[in-house]
Image: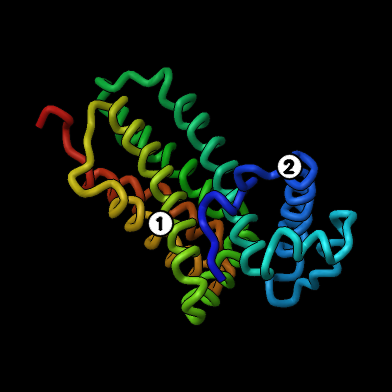
Amino acid sequence: MTTSGADLGSPKGMTRRRAETRRRVVEAAYDVFTEMGIRDAPVELICDRAGFTRGAFYSNFASKEELFLAVYEVQTQERTTRLRAAVAEATAAVDPTSPDAVTRVLQDAGVLFMESLTADETWYLLNLEFRAQALRQSDLRAPTAAAERRFHDALAQILLDLLGRLGLRLTVEPHSAVITIVRLYETMLEQAILDELPDTADNRYLTQVLPRLLTALVAPADG
């Protein structure tokens, strides 16, 4: 299976009618996947939810995996848009010269970043299921890596914009910073899920670990 970034939303040259069909299938797939998981989600149920026959599915997607990548692309784009607006609002009234401004803003921004990554436990577990499948299947690795890279690059740009407003810069490559933040949070979230204490773990990470991590990765912009 080969899937390019352009294929995930509405490919160029697609008619309005087909684009609408694709959109409805993607929306239905998101609901069914979050309810049942990718492996157990029947194509027939996705098509039924979208109001189409199986033909609508196979005329747009080669597999459920390709469909999930389209769902992932739409969901991450929506989360990125909301995150960008929320970060801008959170920093608009902040005085960067205030002694506790940096710590407070980084903590608030951390909460917003984590919400964009997980949204809810079900969506996170769905991503985890697909990532495990992509690691096992070589044909899924490249499109999965490309989709993740687009999301992480968008997060990195938002982080750079945030730090710029605070007069700060990253001391490491932006993509590496995002990967570090994301992977550490995922590790803590997974442990919290296993311990059935997600709220406690989330609060500890957001109030203690993440602000210190971000502080360690930044320096004054004029330094």
Kind of residue indicated by mark 1: Val
Label 1 SS: helix
Q: Residue at x 35, y 50 (%)?
A: 210
Q: Nearer the viewer, residue 206 or 123?
A: 123
Kind of residue indicated by mark 2: Thr
Which residue lies under the disc numbered 2?
15
Q: Residue at x 64, y 42 (%)?
A: 13
Report the side of 23 relative to 209 (left or right): right
> First in sequence: mark 1 or mark 2?
2
- Label 2, residues with CA under 10 Å away: few <14, some 14-19, many ≥20: few
Q: Is residue 203 above or below residue 39?
A: above
Label 2 SS: loop
Q: Which mark is residue 73?
A: none
Q: Is residue 111 above or below residue 203?
A: above
Q: Quadrant of the N terminus?
A: bottom right
Which residue lies under the disc numbered 1?
182
Q: Nearer the viewer, residue 220 or 23?
A: 23
Tags 1 and 2 touching, CB below 8 Å? no
- The percent position of residue 191, horizontal first and vertical second, equals 48, 71
Q: Residue at x 23, y 49 (%)?
A: 173
- The percent position of residue 182, horizontal first and vertical second, equals 40, 56
- The percent position of residue 196, horizontal first and vertical second, equals 59, 69
Task: Work out which residue is located at the far front of the displayed protein and give it.
Answer: 13
Q: Nearer the viewer, residue 104 or 86?
A: 86
Q: Is residue 19 above or below residue 68?
A: above
Report the side of 40 relative to 183 (left or right): right
- The percent position of residue 214, horizontal first and vertical second, equals 29, 46
Q: CA distance from mark 1 to mark 2?
A: 37 Å
Q: Residue at x 30, y 33 (%)?
A: 163
User: Nearer the observer, disc 1 or disc 2?
Assistant: 2
